[in-house]
Image (cartoon, helix red, strand yellow):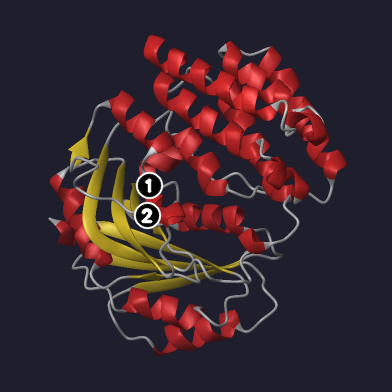
Amino acid sequence: MTDQMKISIIVPVYNVERYIEECLKSVMEQNFGGALECIVVDDCGSDSSMAVVERLTGAYTGPIEFRIISHDRNRGLSAARNSGIRAASGDYVSFLDSDDRLLPGAIAAMAVVAEKFSGVDIVQGDMWLKNPTRFMDFLCVSPVLFPEYSDDRAWCSRSLLTEIPMTACGKLIRREFITGNDLYFCEGLLHEDDMWRVCAARQVRSVAFCFTPVYFYRNDNADSIIHRKDKTLSFVSRLKIIGNMVDGFGQSDYRGECRYLFDALQFAGKAQVWECIGDKALAGAELRRLDRMARKSRLPGLFRFMIRYMTLPVRIGDSMFVRPFYLSFINRSFNKLMAEG
């Protein structure tokens, strides 16, 4: 019964004064019949976000248990989520970014699915976007694309890498799946959700889907870290994530790993990405490190070649005389690799 299930909502807070009231009210309005706790993690912002949190939670008299955890300094989103996980006592945890909000009935809808498929590792809900675009279609789930449940480990691993929304939000995640497999978020890294799914894909045993919209994702927050003009940290983080996949290649679904690497390397290898990097020396050093790692790995030759190609100067790698042949070669090679795999 869902009234016997406990769920922990983890809300990291850092400089979101404009959005935090809407976020927390969306939690307070949930109609879940079981035990629900909301862990707010103060990550030491410079605005009045926490004053708003304290006002709202201090006046709240409903059944949800609100707890505030305070860092002693700003440590970033990953560290805030990790603090929330360690403090959580729920059977499942749900991550809510403080500039987003839960939709009405979200927790109850996902809990029904978790109850129906007892012990499922991940329940993925559908998501709404502030500004829908074709680029963001990957955040939505549909019964046309996904089954209600699967415990086929290969399928779950492959889908988590390539099709299931990569965000940690919009999900119920079994707490022991995280703690038992050491699936904490990598601190000091951007695209932490992407790193998390790479690691989770090696451990996941079952996934279920809630086709009810559960999460409102705000993709127009100009203050978000993803909107920084200098993409050095973003690029270096992506290379570290690719490096994690390279280092552990073969630990999850082969076809899923190949699809993930092919897409990630194509994106990271674009000249437009390189042009947005401020500290090219740092980015170059990380790229050479990845190249050395790839040469010692069990990667298919295609991916070692793609990484080596990225080390070429942009004027060569992106020239009109080289890039068309490169794209033709890697696409043909990838199709062959997938057909053989």
| Mark found first going from the N terminus, 2 or 1 | 2
Check disc 1: other Cα within 10 Å, few if <14, some if 14-19, many if 20+. many
The local secondary structure at tag 2 comes to strand
Q: Looking at the image, which is closer to me, 86 or 40?
A: 40
Check disc 2: other Cα within 10 Å, few if <14, some if 14-19, many if 20+. many
Q: Quadrant of the C terminus?
A: top left
Residue 50 position by quadrant: bottom right
Task: Find disc 2 in the rendering and name its residue.
Answer: 93
Residue 269 numbered tag: none
Q: Is residue 328 visible?
A: yes
Task: Find disc 1 in the rendering and name its residue.
Answer: 175
Q: Is residue 298 visible?
A: no
Q: CA distance from mark 2 to mark 1?
A: 6 Å
Residue type, mark 1 in image: Arg
Q: Quadrant of the N terminus?
A: bottom left
User: Residue at left 29%, top 78%?
Assistant: 29
Position of 175 with respect to 319 (left or right) is: left
Q: Looking at the image, which is closer to me, 162 or 72?
A: 162
